Amino acid sequence: MKKSLKLFSVAVALFIVFAGIGYYAVKSSAYMDVSQVLKLDHRAKVTVRGYLVGTQYDAQAKKLYILLEGKDGSKLVAVADAKYIEDKYGPIQYLQWDPNNVVLQGIYDPQHKVLVVTDILEGCHSNYGQPAART
């Protein structure tokens, strides 16, 4: 009986630990709306969700500019490295975007009010099968 009580106690303790880790992971990875990001007054790594207003490719600078709109109409400019986009999704001219759901991860610079994109999590895909990148 003592042994089963110890095992039960260990199981409960492990459950509490893993539940805490899961809660922390969910809370720390929450998506922010564009309006929330624009209120930040310090550089921060963020994951932002918004509506796609438009994109513009600067071939000379090799940058893709993405304009997102928040729920309240506020707008955020995000800039992504074109090489990253093309390596992950294929040629930029063939990209298809979901205008209602774009999720970007990156570093927000409040001084310039720009998001420097490190990853596109949702909302962008190519219209043809892109082979996996070799690393």
Image: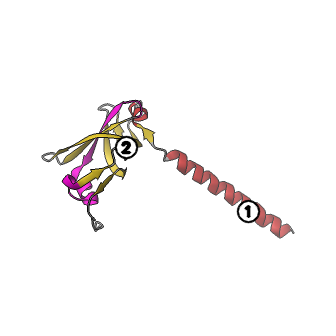
Residue occupying the far left of the picture: 60
Q: Secondary structure at mark 1?
A: helix
Residue 109 pos. (x, y %)? 33, 36
Count every numbered label the image shows and give the total: 2
Query: Residue 134 appears in which quarter of the rendering?
Result: bottom left
Choose the circle earlier in sequence order: 2 or 1: 1
Could you tell whether 76 is left or right of 12 in the image?
left
Classify 87 as above or below 33: below
In this view of the protein, which residue sits in the foreground, 95 or 19?
95
Residue 46 in view = no
Residue 5 pos. (x, y %)? 82, 64
Query: Could you tell me which residue is drawn at 32 percent across and 35 percent down?
Result: 76
Query: Residue 55 appears in which quarter of the rendering?
Result: top left
Q: Secondary structure at mark 2?
A: loop
The residue carrying pointer 2 sits among few (fewer than 14), some (14 to 19) or many (20 or more) residues within 10 Å by Cα, namely few
Q: Are marks 2 and 1 in contact (CB under 8 Å)?
A: no
Residue 39 pos. (x, y %)? 41, 30
Query: Residue 83 in magenta?
Result: yes
Identify the magenta region.
71-94
Numbered label attached to residue 100: 2
Residue 105 pos. (x, y %)? 37, 47
Query: Could you tell me which residue is drawn at 17 percent across and 48 percent down?
Result: 62
Query: Could you tell me which residue is drawn at 36 percent across and 40 percent down?
Result: 51
Identity, as a three-letter code, of the amino acid under mark 2: Asn
Query: Could you tell me which residue is drawn at 54 percent across and 51 percent down?
Result: 25
Query: Residue 129 appears in which quarter of the rendering?
Result: bottom left
State which quarter of the image contains the C terminus: bottom left
Query: Residue 15 in magenta?
Result: no
Numbered label attached to residue 10: 1
